[in-house]
Amino acid sequence: MPNQIPKRFVSQKKIMDVDVNTLWDLITRPGHLEDVHPYCSSNEVIKWNDQACTDVLVYSNGRTFVRNFKPWNFQKGYELWIGPENGAQHFVRWEIESIENRSSLSITIYPSILNKWPLFITFIPFYFWIKPRLNAYLNAVLGGIYYYLDNDLPVPRDSPNPHPWFS
């Protein structure tokens, strides 16, 4: 697992019409991505306990990523490394905030896709290719969580739109 967080990141935030406890219970439930993630085909738990959590996310297009969680910050969020087994790993941070009787969830992705290139060379590919696709991805994931919380039904696959990397 890498120990250096990439410098560039993409972040999205959404207000959820539930309290922090409800949101926390959902996003820390084993296998929850099958209900909330629009590009998830399956979310198999490898290990899920107080000391360590690892699961496997299989996207709609068959791409398979392993998620290795760092220790959780109870009802505040968590961090994880995600990527293909033995491949490049991306750092992701999930953060919850309380807003009166509602909550917000922000997800920040630090993609490692251009890590081996000098930072100044990555500006154009990051801002014109990677960032727009990750913004669409994060909006879909946050929208899927909101949909599940609002409807108590799994999010429709590839909603709101198919994604070029994961559908």
Image: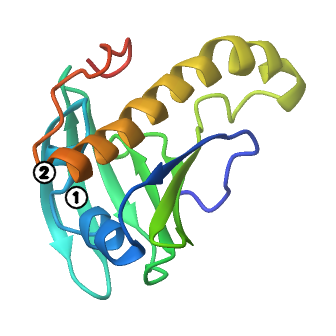
Q: CA distance from mark 1 to mark 2?
A: 23 Å
Residue 106, numbered circle: none
- Estimate how packed mark 2 is, as few (under 14), some (14 to 19) or many (20 or more) residues with alpha carbons within 10 Å: few
Q: Measured along the vertical axis of the image, is residue 20 above or below residue 84?
A: below
Quarter where residue 25 is shown:
bottom left
Colouring scheme applied when the structure was drawn? rainbow
For the image shown, how many numbered marks are present on the structure?
A: 2
Q: Residue at x 11, y 54 (%)?
A: 44
**Left or right: 49 in relation to 153:** right
Query: Which residue in the structure is indicated by mark 2?
Result: 152
Q: Quadrant of residue 165?
A: top left
Where's residue 64, x and y in %? 24, 36
Name the amino acid type tagged 2: Asp
Label 1 sits on residue:
55
Q: Going by the image, does 121 lie left or right of 66?
A: right
Q: Nearer the viewer, residue 37 or 119?
A: 37
Q: Give 91 or 132, whichever is nearer the viewer.
A: 132
Dividing the image into 4 quarters, which one contains the C terminus?
top left
| Residue located farthest toward the right when viewing the structure as drawn | 120
Query: Residue 157 appears at what percent x and percent y?
Result: 17, 25
- The disc, 1 or 2, on the residue closer to the chain's N-terminal end is 1
Q: Quadrant of residue 29?
A: bottom left
Q: Amino acid at mark 1?
A: Asp
Q: At numbered mark 2, what does the secondary structure look like: helix, strand or loop?
A: loop
x%, y% of residue 26? Answer: 25, 64
Residue most extreme to the front: 101
**Helix, strand, or loop for circle 1?**
strand
